[in-house]
Each structure stands twice: as C-alpha cells, then as structure tokens.
C-alpha cells in the first residue's frame, strides 16, 4: 500500500469517532484531507466542524460542511488530526503544516484527540522530525539562541524565499537536534519563553487514541487513562 492509501485508510476509519449531531474538531494536513473527504459522506448527519486552519476551512466549506468559529461553540466531543511524530504514550510533534497553534487550541477544546497517521509517524522518542515553534517575529534571533542553549539548531521556515507567515500572522522556527526525553517538561519549558506562541510538542494535549495505517490494516493505539 502507498503512503497515500494508508492515509485514506485511517481517514475513513476516523469516522467511527464522529457522533451524529455533533460539531467535529478538524485538524490540518494531507492525512486530515483524507478524513475531510470521508466526512463529506456524513455531512447531513453532523452539525458541522471547527477547523484548525484556513486550508482545512476552505476544504470543509467546498464539500458543504458548515464551519463554526471556536468561540461560537462549547466543548467538542472529538478532535481529529494528523501528526509528524507520535510516541508510545500519545505525545506528538505537530506543525509540519504550520497550523500548530490553532491545532492546539481546538485540541484543548475537545474531550478526545484522535490522531490519524501512517505507521512511519510512530517513534520511540520525539525529536527526529524538526520541532516547529510558532514565534513572534521580533523574538526570533533570541529564541534561536535559546534553542542553541538546549543543543538545538533553529531555522526560520521559508516560503518562496521569505519567512512563512502563519494563519495568525507569525513565523515558524524549525528546530533540529533536540533531545526530548520528557515531552511534558519540554513543552512547559519552551512555552514560557517570551515570544513563543506555541511549541509543536503536544504532550499536554496528547492523543487519546491513534489510528495507525499499516499494510495489514488500521492498528488502534489507546492512550486514554495513561
Ligand atoms: C499540520 C500538522 C499535521 O497534522 C502534520 O504535519 C501531519 O501532516 P500530514 O498528515 O500531511 O503528514 O501538524 O500543522
């Protein structure tokens, strides 16, 4: 099976976590795009979605799914999103699509985080994938030095030769070389640095369930209660 087929498999499998009548939290990325396509088959049975990016919002609307502002609704029953890495406890690295801040907001508003990913995303320790960090641009140079003090090399993500601008009008640092032995502590530490909007380690908002696409089918990993 190709990686694209594995993504479609988990995108379809995630429908089992969608409760009829509810508003669904929807993430961002190529795996979530498969979920959005699958969700269209349920569009008359759900109330709509809260989206984590302008890109997902456009896709949802194009398929006739109503999109609500996060502030206009209460707690969501489920948030479905991909990951760049997920470990054996459900901690993730996210933000490869630059949507990490809104992803963390919608995840925090949801009772359950269902991660959908192909099996290449499962790791024993986070940090091989460059950790995305959304930052206020005037803090960039100092934050590069702060990551260097942890042994990390941070570079500004570019798009068409200029710093990529997120949906929130900020920039992204991609940080390599980090040893993330304790994801909860790492997330808490970096969150406190002035100028950091969001760090792409999701340990406080970790996955409750992961649907992992494998050549043998969908494997369900449960982290709830752990
Ligand atoms: C976007 C994300 C995505 O969930 C992550 O990058 C995985 O994307 P894909 O499903 O395309 O591999 O965090 O900000």
Image: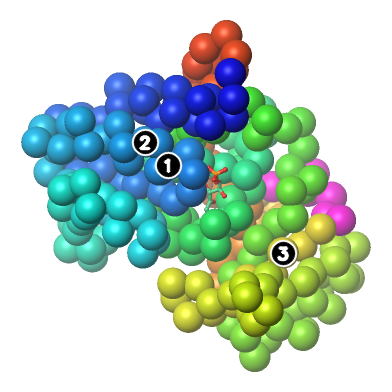
| Residue underneath mark 2 | 35
> Can residue 156 be found in the magenta stretch?
no
Disc 2 to disc 1, C-alpha distance: 5 Å
Of the pair 197 and 54, the residue shown nearer to us: 54
Q: Is residue 66 left or right of residue 137?
A: left
Instruction: Indicate which disc residue 32 carries.
Output: 1
Q: In the image, what residue occupies the spot 68% across and 79% down?
A: 161
Can residue 182 be found in the magenta stretch? Answer: yes
- Mark 2 Cα within 10 Å, few/some/many (few <14, many 20+)? many
Q: Which residue is denoted by mark 3 in the rendering?
A: 174
Q: Residue 196 occupies which quadrant of the picture?
A: bottom right
Q: Position of residue 190 (x, y in %)?
A: 68, 66
Query: Badge 3, how many Cα within 10 Å: few under 14, some, many 20+?
Result: many
Give coordinates of residue 44: x percent, y percent.
9, 36
Look at the picture and state if 86 lies above or below 177.
Answer: above
Question: N-terminal of the two: label 1 or label 3?
Answer: 1
**Residue range corresponding to the magenta coloring:** 177-183
């Amino acid at each position: 099976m190709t990686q694209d087929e594995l993504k479609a498999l988990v995108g379809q499998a995630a429908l089992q976590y969608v409760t009829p009548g509810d508003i669904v939290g929807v993430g961002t990325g190529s795996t979530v795009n498969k979920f959005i396509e699958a969700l269209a088959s349920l569009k008359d049975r759900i109330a709509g979605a809260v989206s984590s990016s302008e890109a997902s919002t456009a896709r949802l609307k194009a398929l006739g799914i109503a999109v609500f502002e996060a502030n206009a609704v209460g707690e969501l029953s489920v948030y479905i999103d991909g990951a760049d890495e997920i470990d054996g406890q459900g901690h993730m690295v996210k933000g490869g699509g630059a949507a990490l801040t809104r992803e963390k907001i919608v995840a925090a508003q949801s009772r359950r985080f269902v991660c959908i990913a192909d099996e290449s995303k499962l790791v024993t320790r986070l940090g091989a994938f460059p950790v995305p960090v959304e930052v206020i641009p005037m803090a960039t140079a100092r934050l590069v030095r702060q990551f260097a003090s942890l042994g990390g090399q941070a570079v500004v993500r570019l798009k068409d030769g200029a710093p990529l601008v997120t949906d929130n009008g900020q920039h992204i640092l991609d940080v390599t070389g980090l040893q993330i032995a304790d994801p909860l502590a790492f997330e808490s530490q970096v969150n406190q640095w002035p100028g950091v909007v969001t760090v792409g380690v999701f340990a406080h908002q970790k996955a409750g369930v992961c649907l992992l696409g494998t050549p043998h089918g969908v494997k369900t990993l449960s982290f709830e209660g752990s």
